[in-house]
Amino acid sequence: MKILSTIIFCLLTALVWAQQNAGTLVYEFKANLHRQLPPDNQDMKAMIPEFRTSRFQLLFTPEASLYKAIEEEEDEDDMHQGGGMRIRINAGNDEIYRDLTNRRRIEKREFMGQEYLIDDTLKTAPWKLSADRKTVMGFDCMKAMWSDTTNKREIVAWFAPTIPVPSGPDIYTSLPGMVLEVDINNGETVIRAQTAEWKQPSEKALKAPKGPKDGKTVTADEYRAIVDEQLKKMGGGRGGIRIMRN
């Protein structure tokens, strides 16, 4: 009887895992904006809120994933009064599509009022795996680390091997399991999965973004060059807030 119970448990576990390779994850994105300010621009603290919290969703299957902001009504918490101005910081309309089968990335990004469509191959970050483990949203997760020298960031990701899809929030993907939590620079930015729905996304919902008629289609390197050039003209940053480049 004990052997039979063990077999049944293993079969049920395998069935649950099989059902967890497609669905929708909702992430909370929390950034400490004050910590992102350079030392010579600390007066900006009075003009922006300390923290910015947004919600994003990741639709995924074994073949593809789509990460984008969740449209929400404007909240007073999104507004900040400072220096006689009211400043609203929104989550943006960027969309990040990963074609996992053909290893393509198609992203819609907005920068300096111009929309760009990035069409390029999927690239893998130089992750280093660790033996450390922790539980995130009920899943046993493994630790991976990445020193992003381009953007001067130390990144820690926690991924769940039991969700066998190499995807995750934003650019934090390409690990042997779904990334459920990301910590950048020891709490400067934290992205954490909050809820999950294990239902196959529709083809209409999970599709690659299309650029606007007046937008530009570029490669990742071309987009990075555009951002770098504009940041140089602005003295290295936009209002002191770092812009991540990937």
Image: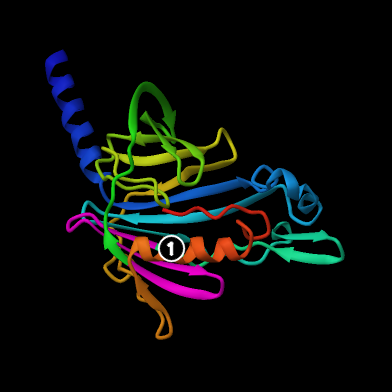
- Rendered location of residue 245, percent (x, y): 46, 54
- Rendered location of residue 74, percent (x, y): 66, 66
Residue shown at 69% from the left, 59% from the top: 78
- Rendered location of residue 168, percent (x, y): 37, 47
Indicate whether 217 appears above or below 144: below
Instruction: Indicate the secondary structure of the residue bearing disc 1.
Output: helix
Location of the N terminus (image quadrant): top left
Query: In which quarter of the view is residue 11 placed?
Result: top left
Give the residues in magenta: 96-118
Residue shown at 45% from the left, 39% from the top: 181
Query: In which quarter of the view is residue 88 placed?
Result: bottom right
Residue 74 relative to residue 81: left or right: left
Indicate whether 152 appears above or below 60: above
Indicate whether 107 appears above or below 160: below
Query: In which quarter of the view is residue 201 placed?
Result: bottom left
Out of 135 and 175, give the one closest to the viewer: 175
User: Which residue type does callout 1 highlight?
Assistant: Ala
Residue with the most extreme top position = 2
Label 1 crowding class (10 Å Cα cut-off): few <14, some 14-19, many 20+? few
Magenta stretch holds residue 76: no
- Rendered location of residue 246, percent (x, y): 41, 53
Identify the residue under disc 1.
225
Indicate whether 166 appears above or below 85: above
